[in-house]
Image (cartoon, rainbow, N blue to C red):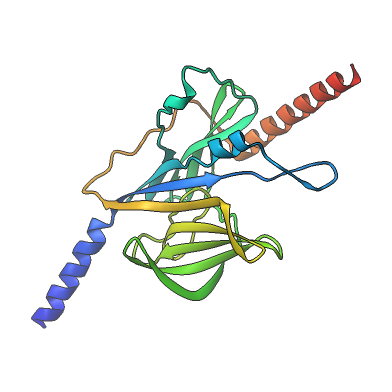
Amino acid sequence: MKYLVIFISLFSIVLQAQDALEIEYEEVSIPRLFGKDGKEEKLGDDFIKALSVPKTYVLQIEKGKSVFSKIEKINNSQGNALVTMYGIFSYNFEQDFNQNKMKQEWMIENKKYLVTDTISTHYKYELTQEKSTYLGFDVKQAVVKYNDNNKSIIWYAPSLPKRFGPKEFINLPGLVLKIESIRNGIIDPSYFLKATSVTTKDHLEFKKLFKAKEISKAEFEKLKADYNQQSSNEHQGVDKD
């Protein structure tokens, strides 16, 4: 009986230690561009080189809550160039699985918004019997099929907090540690998202989202539609000239 009590106590300590976690990820995402004829267009070498530099993120988890944010790094090769971004962009987000709510940073042109929504699963996962190890953790495999030729392979660790993961890869029975892209049956190096470290913490100071007006997902979709329509009208005007 003493051994049983010791085992249960140790198991409880492990679970408590995992209540607060920081996971760092690296992501490479090189888009595929297609012309009006449907054929894939070749990207410039400099463009591919720039996008091949991994972006780094951190996922902070504690007591049913998480924040996923980009780790900004200084790239000396960029010099003092000033880059102006036009369009619609998403950034960091926080999730509260206790209340099934989330907030995400968005920008339309230079205007900031905090968009609130319920937490939902973006993908239809197929859980397989495949098993492996990654970063010292036992992991299981899930698959997302986009079409006959393209799919994502997701590896999650059942021993780590469930439902959490980077970006939209959530709501699996374990923490998502690695995503690979498969195209035509082989690993596609143009996209991957993988954890590089998993660190337990006694307590976390969650990264704060930027300050902005909070709006609902429905309100934001309306703003996006209006912006896209305005942009389309402006482009049509340029073409006519």
Q: Measured along the vertical axis of the image, is residue 142 above or below residue 98?
A: below
Q: Extreme front residue here? A: 45
Q: Nearer the viewer, residue 118 or 185?
A: 185
Pick out the residue farthest to the left.
2
Q: Residue at x 46, y 63 (%)?
A: 155
Q: From what the image shows, is residue 77 above or below residue 133?
A: above
Residue 133: % across, % down: 38, 68
Which residue lies most toward the bottom here? 1
In the image: residue 122, left or right of residue 161: right
Q: Where residue 222 appears, x then y in whole percent?
A: 69, 33
Q: Is residue 44 above or below residue 112?
A: below
Q: Residue 97 location, x and y as percent?
A: 43, 52
Q: Is residue 226 left or right of residue 199?
A: right
Residue at figure coordinates x 85%, y 24% from the top left = 236
Q: How many marks?
A: 0
Q: Position of residue 74 (x, y in %)?
A: 40, 28
- Residue at 36% x, 36% y: name it: 207
Q: Quadrant of residue 72?
A: top left
Residue 241 figure quarter: top right
Looking at the image, residue 59 lies above or below residue 209: below
Q: Is residue 236 in sight in this rendering?
A: yes
